Amino acid sequence: MKVLSFLIAGMLSTMLLHAQLKTTVLCSPFDVDVLEGSVNRLFTYSTLADVEKLFPCFTSASPETNGSTCGGVFYKDRDVYFFTERNYIEIGEHFKGKMSLSIFGANRGSLFNVLGNPSIKDITWDAYQTKYGILILYYNKAGKINKLQMSNRNAATLKLCE
């Protein structure tokens, strides 16, 4: 009887240990292609499900509704935001990964040879027409790039989230 009790107690404690173990979700490194408008071949028009499937390590996600919200998948620890409901991708200056062009920290106007002239200019940003839609580069007070947004929309139809 003592042996049977001991075996049952051992099995229960083993099951409890397994219940406490959680796997760490891993993501492949982010590879941003600024000229193609993609992150690991996920484009600005990719769906929420596509993004979550390729990069399951997201820090948060917001469901899509009817275009009135900012639904998407967000990677705050990598400074990457997929606004799937509004068809754009935002990359911040604390981005962790590879980028096809060394953009962050570049001076305003220094990418003329690659991007040409901006189609729209503002005090803190420039918008460039691209083959996939639009690329918006944001500048800090020193005039260096600190954020970018890529979209398959044009300047007239793009709706950004706050």
Image (cartoon, rainbow, N blue to C red):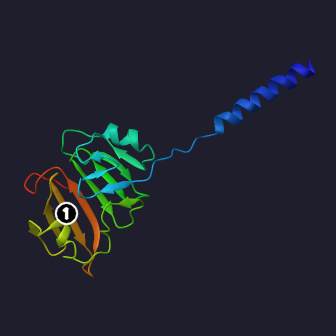
Residue at the extreme bottom of the image, as rendered: 142
**On screen, residue 30 above or below 17:** below
Residue 109: which quarter of the image?
bottom left
Determine the residue positioned at 7% across, 55% down. 156
In the image, 41: left or right of 158?
A: right
- Which residue appears at 24% of the width and 59% of the height? 149
Relative side of 85 to 158, left or right: right
- Residue ID at (81%, 27%): 9
| Res 125 → quadrant | bottom left
| Residue 129 percent location from the top left of the image | 12, 59
Q: Quadrant of the C terminus?
A: bottom left
Percent coordinates x, y for residue 29 in the rendering: 44, 53
Specify whether residue 19 is in view. yes
Question: Which element is circle 1 on?
Answer: strand
Residue at the spot 31% in from the left edge and 40% down from the top edge: 48
Q: How many marks?
A: 1
In-front residue for pair 3/28: 28
**Quadrant assignment, res 124:** bottom left
Where residue 88 appears, as percent x and y from the top left, is 23, 51
- Considering every residue shown, the one lying at the far top of the view is 1
Side of 4 where 135 appears, left or right: left
Compared with residue 103, is residue 30 higher up or lower down, i.e. above or below?
above
Disc 1 crowd rating (10 Å Cα; few below 14, some 14-19, many 20+) is many
**Rendered location of residue 106, percent (x, y):** 28, 75
Q: Amino acid at mark 1?
A: Ile
Q: Which residue is mark 1?
A: 136
State whether residue 88 is above or below residue 22: below
> In the image as oriented, which residue stretches furthest toward the right?
2
Query: Is residue 162 at all visible to an observer of this figure?
Result: no
Query: Which corner quadrant holds the N terminus?
Result: top right
